Image (tube, rainbow, N blue to C red):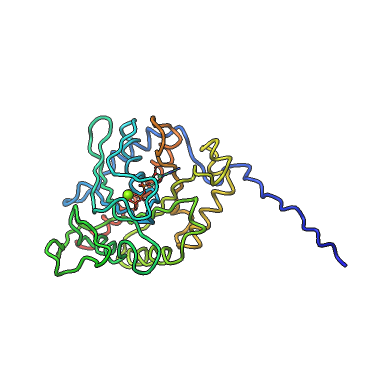
Amino acid sequence: MGSKESKPVESIPDFDTPWRSVDWTKKEDLEEELTDIQLNHPELRHVRILLHGPVGAGKSCFINSVQSVFKGEIITMAGEESCANKSFTKRYKSHTFINSNSETLPFIINDALGLEKGESNGIDPEDIVSALKGHITEGYKFNPISPRCEEDQDFIREPTLKNKVHCLVSVVPANAISRMDDSLIQKMKYIRKKATDLGIPNVVVMTKVDADVCPLVNKDLTQIYISRKIKEKMQDCENRLGPPMKSIFPVSNYHEETETNNTKDVLILTALLQIVKCAKEYVSRQHTTRE
Ligand SMILES: Nc1nc2c(ncn2[C@@H]2O[C@H](COP(=O)(O)OP(=O)(O)OP(=O)(O)O)[C@@H](O)[C@H]2O)c(=O)[nH]1
Ligand SMILES: [Mg+2]
């Protein structure tokens, strides 16, 4: 009879060299590139980015982190909540950003209610789709019981390019992606598919890479692309949600710090630059198709 002794599980080693290259010295270059982006569009001064994702994924925290990077100090402008089952963010809100020279940056990020698991819980995905199309008014208080409809007084019936979303960002927490409820994944996939049908690009920001996903990264965030665990989480995200690896950007938001730091800044700016470039590309396509 063969031995029933199980072999010890060998832990798969991390990578010897980073599988995605990051230049940790280029923070200023990234900031400059983002500040100087020209939209070359007569109607637009900003591209509009919409965040969606589960309750507590770090959407509002990402918005605060972006502003913190550009100001060089920790800023809280979007409300965050540490232990919410229901979405802490209640209203559709556009956030604009300024840098330390008080220049307005060429992008707006919209925060919305978080998605919940279960068919009839939380924000209706149709509300996010309405936001993508530009029908939702600023400050709109989402009603989880009934989605926005054309009969509503403040429904924007004929949205212009300014009202529409130019890049959809799915915010997914690295420490929860593998056990995220399937109903939630289906809602996110539905919203991503609608965006794709509308020609709107999608990018994924994978938050909470510092939250006990990988001891190596917990100790040193610069090891992010050496870590096998982080790559596995990104692959989980690719497999469950559908985006290709090249559209997934891991970040660690400012959630407990009292000062900004270069490594977090570079990861946040790298994700943001890709998002803004996708949005710009979408906008320039709209411009060309109308000519
Ligand atoms: N460790 C860690 N914690 C984070 C990170 N991002 C967000 N958090 C924490 O996660 C909690 C939820 O973050 P929020 O930004 O409020 O989440 P949200 O997606 O806006 O959630 P709702 O508005 O409720 O839908 C807060 O306590 C944040 O401080 C991160 O990258 N790492
Ligand atoms: Mg929020």
Q: Is residue 175 left or right of residue 73?
A: right
Expressed as whole percent of the image width and height from the top left, the position of residue 178 reads: 52, 58
Q: Residue at x 59, y 48 (%)?
A: 228
Q: Residue at x 11, y 64 (%)?
A: 153
Q: Residue at x 80, y 58 (%)?
A: 5
Who is closer to the viewer here, 163 or 113? 113
Q: How many marks do you count on the picture?
A: 0
- The quadrant where residue 159 appears: bottom left
Expressed as whole percent of the image width and height from the top left, the position of residue 81 reads: 35, 46
Q: Is residue 209 above or below residue 87?
A: above
Q: Is residue 104 left or right of residue 13?
A: left
Q: Is residue 1 left or right of residue 183?
A: right
Q: Is residue 207 above or below residue 146?
A: above
Who is closer to the viewer here, 116 or 230? 116
Expressed as whole percent of the image width and height from the top left, the position of residue 201 reads: 35, 58
Q: Is residue 85 left or right of residue 101?
A: right
Q: Residue at x 37, y 60 (%)?
A: 116
Q: Is residue 123 above or below residue 91?
A: below
